Image (cartoon, coloured by chain):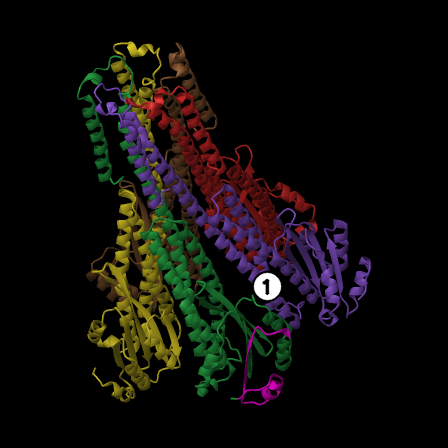
Chain colours: A purple, B green, C yellow, D brown, E red
Amino acid sequence: MANVEINEVSEVLKQPDRFVWIGLHEPSSEVLSQVQKEFCLHDLAIEDAHSAHQRPKIEMYGNSMFIVLRTAQINKQEHRVDFGETHFFLGKNYIVSVRHGSSYSYTDVRTRCETTPQLLRKGPAFALYAVMDSIVDQYFPVIHGMEQELEMIEDKIFDAKPDRKTTEDIYHLKRELLEMKRAVSPLIDISNRLMRFDYELIPEDTRPYFRDVYDHSVRVNETVDNTRELLTTALEANFSLISISQSDVSKKFAGWAAIIAVPTMVAGIYGMNFKFMPELDWPWAYPVILIITFGLSIGLFILFRRSKWL
Amino acid sequence: MANVEINEVSEVLKQPDRFVWIGLHEPSSEVLSQVQKEFCLHDLAIEDAHSAHQRPKIEMYGNSMFIVLRTAQINKQEHRVDFGETHFFLGKNYIVSVRHGSSYSYTDVRTRCETTPQLLRKGPAFALYAVMDSIVDQYFPVIHGMEQELEMIEDKIFDAKPDRKTTEDIYHLKRELLEMKRAVSPLIDISNRLMRFDYELIPEDTRPYFRDVYDHSVRVNETVDNTRELLTTALEANFSLISISQSDVSKKFAGWAAIIAVPTMVAGIYGMNFKFMPELDWPWAYPVILIITFGLSIGLFILFRRSKWL
Amino acid sequence: MANVEINEVSEVLKQPDRFVWIGLHEPSSEVLSQVQKEFCLHDLAIEDAHSAHQRPKIEMYGNSMFIVLRTAQINKQEHRVDFGETHFFLGKNYIVSVRHGSSYSYTDVRTRCETTPQLLRKGPAFALYAVMDSIVDQYFPVIHGMEQELEMIEDKIFDAKPDRKTTEDIYHLKRELLEMKRAVSPLIDISNRLMRFDYELIPEDTRPYFRDVYDHSVRVNETVDNTRELLTTALEANFSLISISQSDVSKKFAGWAAIIAVPTMVAGIYGMNFKFMPELDWPWAYPVILIITFGLSIGLFILFRRSKWL
Amino acid sequence: MANVEINEVSEVLKQPDRFVWIGLHEPSSEVLSQVQKEFCLHDLAIEDAHSAHQRPKIEMYGNSMFIVLRTAQINKQEHRVDFGETHFFLGKNYIVSVRHGSSYSYTDVRTRCETTPQLLRKGPAFALYAVMDSIVDQYFPVIHGMEQELEMIEDKIFDAKPDRKTTEDIYHLKRELLEMKRAVSPLIDISNRLMRFDYELIPEDTRPYFRDVYDHSVRVNETVDNTRELLTTALEANFSLISISQSDVSKKFAGWAAIIAVPTMVAGIYGMNFKFMPELDWPWAYPVILIITFGLSIGLFILFRRSKWL
Amino acid sequence: MANVEINEVSEVLKQPDRFVWIGLHEPSSEVLSQVQKEFCLHDLAIEDAHSAHQRPKIEMYGNSMFIVLRTAQINKQEHRVDFGETHFFLGKNYIVSVRHGSSYSYTDVRTRCETTPQLLRKGPAFALYAVMDSIVDQYFPVIHGMEQELEMIEDKIFDAKPDRKTTEDIYHLKRELLEMKRAVSPLIDISNRLMRFDYELIPEDTRPYFRDVYDHSVRVNETVDNTRELLTTALEANFSLISISQSDVSKKFAGWAAIIAVPTMVAGIYGMNFKFMPELDWPWAYPVILIITFGLSIGLFILFRRSKWL
């Protein structure tokens, strides 16, 4: 293990038992073209590595491999998920990683690798595995956060009153799940190819490690799909419950309207100006009518309560 | 058949005609590492076996096979389904099962196997089959319970009034079905591979048994899919019926409003204070007006009843 | 052609130019084990044959083939579809059919076969074809009945008022279609394999017959899928029309409310007890106000009619 | 080119450089059995050719090919699409077409073919292409008509008020699209097989022609799928707009109810019979109250207009 | 590099180291037949090239390749996307492009290519790549515009009141996305075949360039799918929010109706003409009743505000 200058790299590459591990973060085009020169990389790969917004993929250019992965991590302050990208150039005795956007540095990974030299001795493919593994491991808290978000939405839907915010939350979770899906689902194919195809750059004994990455990415992908399907059902359930709430409002309104309409009607009748209305002259008519009328209203109230209209 | 100490296992493994069958339940990492040493298992497999939350899968590590299955059983007290996991290490002359979470112990299976020594003689593959078969057999009461739950939901939807609880029940059944799907659908692939691929560990004459497991898991999976599709339709039907109920409420309300509004209007008219309103002086005006007005209301009532508004 | 006792079967099987055709209906386990002994059948196949609730499938056990099919027939009395099962054991010179649940007996098929001995001479594969063909032919009236049911539902949706029954009918048709799908869709694969794969038991010249079965099952399956998709659209259309109906109710109610509210308001105004209300003393005020007020109401009525609110 | 009697056909077939082209329309079983005898066709194919209601398919029977296609043409008088069927028997030196249901005769196609003898010389495969091409070409006006129908539905949904007819139109267009789909989608597979598989009956140099048919059927299929998906969205959009309309009705009703309720309430208050109500004796009370009250109503009206409730 | 007359083309084609690049825009059939003659192209390809409305495809005709692509560009004035078509004939030493409908001329692409003669030396395949690349690059602003349109729709849905226009916008964006999908999704297959299959016309060292086109088209396609799925969710969310709005209207209406109904009822009661109503004679009855009544109304108002009905 040693640190070398970037322009001495091509010297080091000639030594058979060593490999070079370079980590770049949003490099300038000068740095990239220097890297290109040292490792003899293809124009198209360098072009891709320079701009972010690539989709996860694996491409062979002669003897070197170009891999693009998406990283994801929770941004707790702004309560959202930040996506980034990491590109890799993998050769017989080198690995170059290029980070774009928000993502943790891979120095931790490197330090951890350096503690297991017997594994690191497997070559740059193991370094690639180590970084891929750390990227996929960062997916788990993200999808766990999304599952929790779904549970919060469920609670809102089933326990609270329908409000616009819940629908908006559902929509935004859907958006994030789609973004996550775009990061994870191509990774299944990538790790599958790394573990199955006969790439010269991936030694036989590192394949179980890529199978491990494959297994993790399948699990993440499955959870994303699951959450998406539940979310769709949640949206529909939410909609049903909005309708039931609306129906409840209508019922309540109708019930109270009936309770108030009856005394109003009766009052109207005894407000008529006919000359000959015998009841008007009875001394106890007023309290009796009041009692009968409000008795009716109370009767209606009890009736509606029983049939759960109120 | 004999019981051996775990550190004598490697001794026993040298005898050609015998095989070792070990069953562990949520083992500590010490036990697992002892097992690893005795059977020479791969690091990654042991790592997986230690933590639960694996997805059902089959993986070859050199000469040994690592299989993960999900178990499911009804928890009657809490009225839900408990999911667990069982991991298997299968070698030429050993099988190790590691149970996680809630699941029945496999001692029953073992006892039953010991009663058919001619089958057990087929080796650890038959033991694997026996446990897989028992796991899949436990799926049937679970999906049967889910089908019954769906029927209860149907009854609620079509016979009772719409309420929030039905929608919530639909959602929770959907959640359980998705969980069940995650347990079963990878099992189809696993048993298919066991019955078809040329694994050295699976002797020719045990393959029909794995085809049986395959067949069972396809059936469970089919029922799950079926129930899911019916549940989706049930959710939509529920929604239609909520709308119809709401429409019925509106109709009832409108009908009664009309029946009450007519006497109120008439009473208002005869409550006007015009000097020259000849009807007011007629002696029979009051009862006649009352009869006409309520006659109208009764007429409306009959009309609405006939057109099924009330 | 001859009838033989079941325990002489193994004798007959030794004769090269003959084949045995046995038809059982929900046999006891004794009969089945006798059959097993005579034809040397596999344990797992006999186990399957004993219990109903298998899914349609085809399985090879050494030299014998085990096939499960689902039967369907309309139960006119109870206005529903009865599903049953038929299992087949096919060997070089025998065919055993085991019927479960409701299905026609296959004696008719047999009689018809016996009238075309040149075809029957093709061996048990032709007998298998004859029964499969008769099973698939019974699907056609069933799916035709379902298509008619769909047309009845369409008529209800588009011509009649929305009611709960229509939604329930849609749901139950969906249920039956799913059941039908489960019977038919595996049959496509089964007949495809019989017509394409190189099974020794299926002679070259009987394959076009299985292609015919394949073709029929594809057609049935297509109709089922079609009906399902139309049914989904019908459910949605039904829902739209429920909403339109509800909207019509609201409009009608609003219209009539307005027509009645205007005279009520006017009557209220002239019911006020102000000392100085000159109109009250005008001799023609009462009839004039009445005419104006009801004129307004009639005007509203005409207006609402024109804009199709009433 | 020459016309021959049907019972001389087998004579002509012996001549190496010629081929026979026969066109039948809903033939009787006698004619069909004569055709069968002359061309040595398989029983099952003749059976299929006799009955309509086959699905589009391609089947080899020894040296002859049996093809079923669906035809579609617009029936302008009854404003719907008529579907028919055409079956083909293709042999080394013959082609027999059997038309069922509504479809144009293929004499035009034949005449056109006869004007390009250099192409017709490629044999019956070219004749098959010519008829298939003409069948597919007739699909285009049909799907164009369906696209126009969709545009009419769009106009109704977005410009007009929601009515039951629009929903019914959507449903019927969906039905026709499904029917069309059933005609077209198997054709993709058929033409793909004709252009790709090594059928002896399809000479190398006619394959580009079948690729042309393939290309056309893919285009038709794509348009059908597209229209279906748009139709589904249209149904949902229609539903949203129905809800918005309903919401608008509610708002209008609520607004006018408020405008009328205020004067009614005020009138009620001054209709009370309290002895000491000083306002009642004020000389200008009546007009002032009227102005205030209706001023309030007008204020509400303006308020509701601004917030788009009215 | 040189410009040649069209009828000298066949002369130039004989020179081994050169290739001809012709660009046509909606050519007349005379020009096309001249082109056909010079390059010996197939009738069917020329026929396709003459008419627009082809779907993107790749077809081999002997030694020449025929490719159809769809172009898309934003029409800012009319606020919509214009689709066009470009057809290519590719031979060993020529490339002919035929533009239909709205699309930029490819002279820019050509000029750019001429600045990199070392790449252009790879032959007509590189010219094909250059034009394909420029076509795909024009997709990006189009889909970016669609994503922005979706964001505008989201803002409308979540921030503004539901109106008919939003639903119409959703529908029209869906239409454009489907159109875009039809342009892009076959391109994935086309570029995949160009990069993978062993076409003689595509030299080994140009394949990475077609992989680049493939990668871009997959990205565009993914974005289109994503936007479609979000749009579907947006339509449903929109619908939920319409329902919530409607529910809010009902609540507001019910609340205000209650607030107004109470004084109206009380006024009615004291408007009754009973002789013996002691309250009527109390001197402070009128103001007291007014205060109590409106106190009740204000109490209701506060109650409704708290429970968020108003």
Please name whichever residue, E65 or E142, is drawn nearer the observer in this view of the structure: E142
Front one among D190 and C154: C154
State which quadrant residue A97 falls in. bottom right
In this picture, residue E18 sits left or right of residue D23? right
User: In this view of the protein, can residue E89 be seen by the observer?
Assistant: no
Give residue D177's position: percent from left, percent from top: 36, 48
Q: Which residue is drawn at 22% across and 72% down?
A: C105
Q: Position of residue E233 (x, y in %)?
A: 49, 46
The magenta segment:
B2-29
Magenta stretch: includes residue B3? yes
Under mark 1, the amino acid is His
Q: Mark 1 points at which residue?
A: A216
Circle 1 SS class: helix
Name the residue: 31% across, 63% down: C216
Q: Which residue appears farthest toward the left when viewing the image?
A: B284
Q: Would residue D91 be counted in the magenta stretch?
A: no
Between residues E56 and E248, which one lies in front from this camera angle?
E248
Residue E302 image offset from top left, x and y in percent? 48, 33
Q: Is residue A201 above or below residue E281?
A: below
Q: Residues within 10 Å of mark 1 (few under 14, many from 20)?
A: many
Q: Quadrant of residue C308?
A: top left
On the rendered image, what quadrant is the N terminus of chain C found in? bottom left
